[in-house]
Image: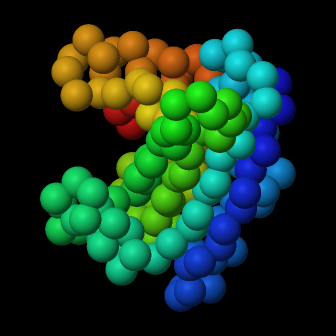
Amino acid sequence: MSAIVDYQQAFEGDDDIARAIPSQTALTQWANAVLQAEGLSEQEVTIRFTGETESQQLNYEYRGKDKPTNVLSFPFEAPPGIELNLLGDLIICAPVISKEANEQGKLVEQHYAHMTIHGMLHLLGYDHIDDNDADVMESKEIAILASLGIDDPYQIK
């Protein structure tokens, strides 16, 4: 397995939040953990880090929710007959991730890992709309994070 991560850093703002944005190396490690768990080979993903304004605009345009969110997933759909190993795009809102990590008493890096894995699973077709799907997706997230030495993010602290 080999993840190709197109890293886009578009966040401009608080220096502490900017410094906490993970490296391309970390993102690649997390993406590779998902690919390994799913038995997939080389796949490409774009991961873009934004501020709240861009996140809110995209969340409103594509989901009808007028607020910034932690991660948005945009799966790539190739035209019929075209084979590409392109999963799609993840848009990760740096201020939301930092705020959530603080509120939940988590390390910011571990929350980035969780949201990256969560978004990658969305790109692969997993969802959490109903309870059964949520259970499947969360169990995959927990297992992948555990393979990286990261505790279950759903445990109440």
In the picture shown, does residue 124 fall above or below 119?
Answer: above
Q: Is residue 132 left or right of residue 52?
A: left
Q: Which residue lies furthest to the front in this view?
A: 81
- Colouring: rainbow
At horizontal 71% and vertical 61% (from top left) the residue drawn is: 7
- Residue at the image position 20 percent from the left and 21 percent from the top: 130
Q: From the top left corner, tell me how far across and down residue 154 is, in percent.
A: 40, 30
The answer to whether residue 147 is visible is: no
Which residue is at the front of the view, 111 or 91?
91
Number of numbered callouts drawn: 0
Residue 52, percent from left and from top: 38, 75
Question: Which quadrant holds the C terminus?
Answer: top left
Left or right for 6, reference 115: right
Q: Is residue 137 above or below residue 32?
A: above
**In the image, what residue occupies the spot 66% across and 68% down?**
8
Q: Is residue 103 visible?
A: yes
Q: Which quadrant is the N terminus positioned in? A: top right
Residue closest to the eye, 85 or 98: 85
Is residue 50 depicted above or below 135 in this figure? below
Which x, y percent locates residue 80? Answer: 52, 31
- Residue in the foreground of this view, choosing between 18 and 91: 91
Residue at x 70% of width, y 13% of height: 39
- Residue 64: image location, x then y, percent: 16, 59
